[in-house]
Image: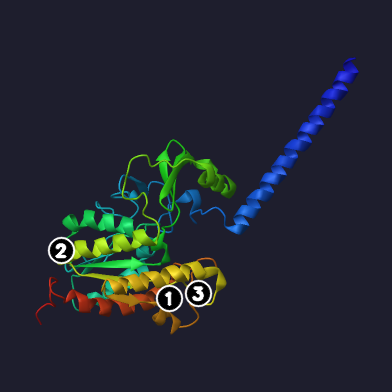
């Protein structure tokens, strides 16, 4: 009797082991499928940071109206959460708002150097935030106008402005808040190592932004149009010039996989033109210097220009901005 029970137990254990192994294999296959298909929108930096401009936890914190914000006085940010100009701290003040592209120092430094050929004390302050869309940037400008007193606001645009990009924000005690589109989800941080778990959370999880905020409902073409118009009107009412710099998809227009991004890029250009916001389109500049893919930092990143491309952008953007700094309401060039 005991032997029979032992045999039955061994058979049950073997069956259980086989079923468990099958489940593990199935989960691994599902994980690979999700990763290969890009079905879970994860930030590139994973759990080691919050977008391309951060390399450690604590660089971003939750924010009531913008979803998340740069932590003050840390990770290279000042007391207002901005990236200061390393070369000057005088005037005129050029405030750049945008997403992670607006945290890349090569083009920002090049722009500042060009401005300082005419305005020796000019400073370029960046309020770039990884993953921000235009509605979040509009809220940010409203908060910064008072303490910063900009002479010119530069809106850095790219296709992500219409929807934003995925971002992870540490909450402490091993938990993370995951922002994607205009929703957010709280979960143990370990879950976000898995694309499958993240996809399941986005598909079946309950959004955690319980209180109404400007961040909720901020993704999509209609919200982009509304927030861009509100940003323009806010600055016009204060006689602060607004210009836009359009960063393109780093691919040729015929690339099938990037068609949704090209449609967003085209809409951003069209809407900026319709609102009479002066804009510098960077696609012609970069196309003149070679294949668009050659301006990428790697084969997978079609958004952020590499350092060589950034140098070209800074050289072109600085002189172009000088025309708008001389507009009514801004300071004129220094006396000779």
Instruction: Determine the secondary structure under disc 3.
Output: loop
- Cα separation, mark 2 vs mark 3, equals 38 Å
Q: Residue furthest left?
A: 335
Instruction: Name the residue at 50% across, 66% down.
Output: 301
Answer above or below: position of 226 versus 250.
above
Relative depth, front residue between 20 and 57 = 20
In the rendered view, does 10 fall on the left or right side of 85?
A: right
Circle 3 is placed at which residue position?
A: 251
Residue at 22 percent across and 53 percent down: it is 143
Mark nearest the camera among 2 and 1 is: 2
Mark 1 residue element: helix
- The mark that comes first in sequence, 1 or 3, is 3
Outermost residue on the bottom side: it is 288
> Measured from the top left, where is residue 197 in percent x and y?
57, 44
Q: Could you tell me which residue is drawn at 35 percent across and 73 percent down?
A: 270
176 left or right, relative to 80: right
Q: Which residue matches tag 1? A: 308
* Residue 317 drawn at (x, y percent): 30, 76
3D distance between C-alphas at marks 2 and 1: 38 Å
Q: Are marks 2 and 1 in contact (CB under 8 Å)?
A: no
Judging by the rendered image, the residue that carries numbered circle 2 is 237
Query: Does residue 62 appear in the picture of this structure?
Result: yes
Given this view, does label 2 or label 3 mark the residue nearer the observer? 2
Asked if residue 301 is positioned above or below residue 144 in the image, the reply reads below
Relative image position of residue 304 (x, y in whole percent): 44, 67
- Give the mark, 2 or 1, whose residue is nearer the N terminus: 2
Does the image show residue 98?
no
């Amino acid at each position: 009797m005991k032997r029979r029970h032992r045999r039955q137990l061994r058979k049950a254990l073997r069956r259980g082991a086989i079923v468990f192994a099958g489940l593990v294999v199935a989960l691994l296959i599902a994980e690979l499928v999700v990763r290969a298909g890009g079905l879970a929108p994860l930030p590139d930096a994973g759990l080691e940071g919050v977008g391309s401009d951060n390399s450690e936890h604590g660089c971003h914190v939750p924010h009531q109206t913008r979803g998340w914000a740069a932590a003050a006085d840390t990770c290279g940010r000042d007391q207002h959460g901005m990236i200061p100009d390393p070369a000057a701290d005088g005037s005129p003040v050029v405030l750049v708002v945008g997403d992670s592209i607006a945290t890349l120092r090569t083009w920002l430094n090049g722009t500042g150097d060009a401005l300082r050929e005419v305005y020796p004390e000019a400073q370029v302050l960046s309020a770039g935030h990884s993953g921000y869309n235009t509605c979040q940037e509009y809220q940010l400008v409203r908060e910064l106008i008072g303490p910063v007193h900009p002479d010119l606001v530069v809106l850095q645009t790219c296709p992500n402005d219409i929807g934003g990009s995925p971002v992870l924000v540490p909450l402490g005690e091993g938990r993370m808040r995951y922002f994607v589109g205009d929703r957010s989800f709280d979960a143990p941080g370990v879950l976000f190592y898995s694309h499958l778990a993240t996809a399941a959370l986005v598909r079946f999880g309950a959004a955690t932004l319980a209180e109404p905020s400007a961040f909720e409902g901020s993704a999509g073409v209609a919200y982009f149009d509304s927030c861009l118009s509100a940003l323009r009107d806010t600055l016009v009412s204060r006689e602060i010039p607004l210009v836009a710099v359009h960063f393109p998809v780093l691919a040729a227009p015929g690339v099938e996989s990037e068609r949704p991004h090209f449609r967003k890029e085209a809409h951003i250009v069209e809407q900026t033109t319709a609102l009479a916001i002066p804009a510098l389109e960077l696609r012609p500049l970069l196309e003149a210097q070679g294949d668009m893919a050659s301006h990428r930092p790697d084969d997978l990143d079609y958004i952020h220009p590499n350092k060589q491309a950034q140098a070209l952008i800074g050289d072109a953007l600085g002189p172009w901005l000088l025309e708008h700094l001389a507009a009514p309401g801004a300071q004129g060039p220094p006396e000779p």
